[in-house]
């Protein structure tokens, strides 16, 4: 008898379980077929495992509709999801802006017609807004009161246009306060960080680092600073060679396939990155195994014979067809000996 799931987890949902994000490909009879976003591994989670983790709050379920909202949030905040990820200074700024947003909502609910002009400095509702924000979060000193004969440091409240933008973005992202943080870190530099000859130097080093002899990057860099050709005009510039850290960062950004082919050769690259090949060729029987997996649909044909066919988990519908019995993952592995499959 097929057990009914306690929770409705539709196809395309993301399960945050054991520190990994698992995308649900299809609901099977015995559990959920999932795919790890980091490693690309596909496997089946038992139904009891998922339901137990949800009951104990060890598993967070993100529905497909919320997945798109989460993508938009991460794009807007540059990867931030909650206020706790900010520094203490930025958290305090977010708290002050949140108090101003809540004050706007409360005043609008009471019938006060707030506008950008009325919330500007010397506006008709400016004092009313700051007084309400002071009641909500008195620690930020929105009114700029004096203490001991001196003007106490308080939050510098912007103009009405900025206050309105705070409220709009706060409600657009489902009232997540993290969107009120500054986004200065996302502006970046408009001009290139490196000049033309520095970029040529980085290409010069990386091209000689991609050698089947596998030289060390530090050795190649040290030698390149002595033999790299620069014109007199370039030598006259008060600019140094790019640091080894910059070049290491560029090397990490290169495709892993390009690095394997450059430093291991075409044959080694085909063995390690080719379809159906092992990471390291085996020198003895059973040292390495080739493996593959596919999703099978078990169904009854028109003549009453049970058959199976390979289906794509990304395109197959979540519900089983009328003649479909079940779905299961087929895992096949075979030992490798000196680069040859033993089937």
Image: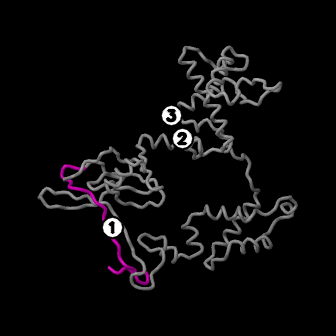
Q: In what element is the residue under mark 3?
A: loop
Residue 297 appears left or right of 51: left
Which residue is outermost to the left?
303
Q: Does 168 sit left or right of 276 as displayed?
A: right
Residue contact between numbered discs 1 and 2, judged by CB atoms under 8 Å: no
Q: Main secondary structure of the magenta part?
A: strand
> Looking at the image, is 244 positioned above or below residue 1?
below
Mark 2 lies on a secondary structure that is: helix
Q: Which residue was labeled with disc 2?
A: 73
Quarter of the image where the C terminus is located: bottom left
Between 54 and 308, the one lying in front of the other is: 54
Residue displayed at 71% across by 61% down: 246
Q: Nearer the viewer, residue 30 or 84?
A: 84
Q: Residue at x 42, y 78 (%)?
A: 288
Provide the residue designation for mark 1.
331
Image location (x, y in percent) of residue 287:
42, 81
Q: Residue 339: where, in percent of width, then height?
A: 43, 81
Q: Which contiguous range is marked in magenta?
A: 320-343
């Amino acid at each position: 008898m097929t057990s009914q799931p306690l929770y409705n987890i539709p196809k395309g949902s993301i399960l945050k379980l054991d520190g990994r994000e698992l995308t649900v490909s299809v609901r099977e009879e015995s559990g959920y077929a999932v795919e790890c976003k980091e490693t690309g591994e596909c496997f089946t989670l038992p139904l009891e495992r998922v339901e137990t983790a949800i009951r104990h709050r060890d598993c967070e379920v993100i529905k497909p509709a919320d997945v798109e909202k989460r993508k938009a949030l991460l794009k807007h905040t540059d990867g931030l999801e909650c206020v706790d990820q900010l520094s203490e200074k930025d958290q305090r700024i977010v708290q002050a802006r949140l108090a101003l947003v809540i004050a706007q909502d409360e005043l609008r609910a009471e019938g006060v017609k707030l506008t950008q002009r009325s919330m500007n400095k010397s506006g008709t509702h400016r004092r009313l807004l700051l007084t309400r924000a002071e009641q909500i979060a008195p620690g930020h000193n929105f009114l700029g009161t004096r203490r001991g004969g001196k003007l106490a440091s308080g939050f510098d409240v912007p103009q009405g246009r900025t206050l309105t933008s705070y409220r709009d973005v706060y409600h657009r992202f489902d009232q997540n306060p993290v969107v009120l943080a500054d986004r200065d870190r996302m502006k970046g530099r408009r001009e290139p960080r490196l000049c033309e000859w520095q970029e040529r130097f980085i290409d010069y080093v990386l091209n000689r680092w991609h050698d089947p002899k596998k030289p060390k990057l530090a050795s190649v860099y040290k030698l390149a600073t002595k033999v790299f050709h620069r014109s007199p005009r370039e030598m006259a510039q008060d600019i140094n060679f790019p640091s080894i850290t910059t070049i290491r960062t560029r090397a990490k950004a290169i495709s892993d396939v390009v690095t394997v082919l450059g430093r291991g050769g075409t044959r080694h690259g085909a063995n390690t990155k080719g379809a159906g090949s092992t990471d390291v060729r085996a020198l003895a029987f059973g040292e390495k195994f080739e493996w593959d997996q596919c999703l099978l649909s078990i169904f009854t044909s028109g003549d009453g014979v049970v058959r199976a066919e390979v289906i794509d988990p990304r395109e197959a519908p979540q519900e089983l067809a009328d003649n479909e019995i079940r779905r299961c993952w087929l895992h096949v592995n075979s030992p490798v000996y000196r680069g040859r499959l033993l089937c």
